[in-house]
Image: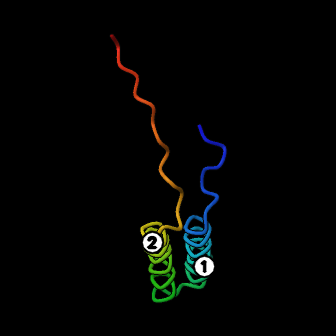
Amino acid sequence: MAHDHGHTPAAWVGSIIAFVGFCVAGVFMVASSPVGFWAGMIIIAAGGVIGGAMRAAGMGQKPKRQILVSEG
């Protein structure tokens, strides 16, 4: 397993946005506000979308090259 998993701008931004959404949803769940709770859930989903878009834009982890060994 690679020791550099997730150390990219896309991973950090997506995770931070999702964490903020989790905190928002948690606060509004305790406050009994369904609208605020669902707003937090939308923020969580936005974190995944934004992180995926950043990865597609080249700010994610570069794919590892695999060495193919033929049996012969």
**Residue 43 locus on image (x, y percent):** 50, 80
- Residue furthest toward the left? 72
The mark closer to the camera, 1 or 2, is 2
Circle 2 is placed at which residue position? 57
- Residue furthest toward the front? 72
30, 45: nearer the viewer: 45
Q: Residue at x 51, y 87 (%)?
A: 36
**Residue 23 locus on image (x, y percent):** 62, 76
The amino acid sitting under disc 2 is Ala
35, 7: nearer the viewer: 7
The amino acid sitting under disc 1 is Val
Relative to 21, is 15 above or below?
Answer: above
Relative to 35, is 72 above or below?
Answer: above
Figure quadrant of the N terminus: top right
Quadrant of the rendered image containing residue 13: bottom right
21, 61: nearer the viewer: 61
Mark 2 neighbour density, 10 Å: few (under 14) some (14–19) many (20 or more):
few
Quadrant of the rendered image containing residue 69: top left
